[in-house]
Amino acid sequence: MLNTKDVIAFVPTRDAEKSKAFYEGKLGLRFVSDDKFAMVFDANGTMLRIARVPKYEPAPFTILGWQVTEIAKIVSNLQKKGVKFEKYEGLGQNELGIWTAPGGAAKVAWFKDPDGNILSVSEHD
């Protein structure tokens, strides 16, 4: 039933202005609209709603990610725009913060938005 319908992604924010600057200015998503509930961005055809919430604690895991090719190039370009990539102790990430899964079939790099939400870019064979 829903397998032919578009997905809408939601990310919470406590500070809409900081989130707008991050998602539009640093990540390059196209801003669509804003109302008292959420800002809407176009994430390559997927609606991303950055929902205004008064209070919450960021989840300790990835809540939104992008599948990419040439992950090292993407990470480098995002770093040039001021995006800081997370380094987790014991994970064995490279100097850019990219982790390679055992067997090498996937590579992942994590970063946070201004509210502390964990986001990622990943490359899969």
Image: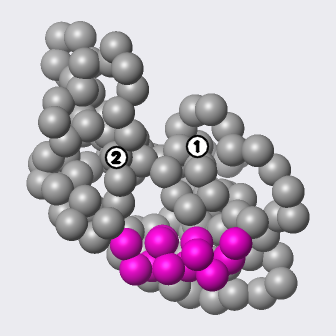
Q: Quadrant of the C terminus?
A: top left
Residue 124 locus on image (x, y percent) = 24, 33
Front residue of this view, candidates 63 and 98: 98
Specify the quadrant of the image occupied by residue 13: bottom right
Front residue of this view, candidates 125 and 54: 54
Q: CA distance from mark 1 to mark 2?
A: 15 Å
* Residue at figure coordinates x 67%, y 38% from the top left: 59
Q: Is 95 left, or right, of 78 in this rendering?
A: left
Give the amino acid type for the residue marked by disc 1 in the picture: Ile
The residues colored magenta run 15-26
In this rendering, the label closer to the viewer, 1 or 2? 2
Q: Is residue 11 in the magenta section?
A: no
Earlier-in-chain disc, 1 versus 2: 1
Residue located beneath label 1 in the image: 63
Give the amino acid type for the residue marked by disc 2 in the picture: Phe
Q: Measured along the vertical axis of the image, is residue 90 above or below residue 115? A: above
The extreme front residue here reads 89
- Circles 1 and 2: CB atoms closer than 8 Å: no
Mark 2 burial class by Cα count in 10 Å: few <14, some 14-19, many 20+: some
Q: Measured along the vertical axis of the image, is residue 51 above or below residue 64? A: below
What colouring method underlies this structural image?
one colour
Specify the quadrant of the image occupied by residue 25: bottom left
Residue 6 showing in the rendered view: no
Residue located beneath label 2 in the image: 85
Question: Of helix, strand and loop, which one carries label 1?
Answer: strand
* Residue at figure coordinates x 71%, y 59% from the top left: 12
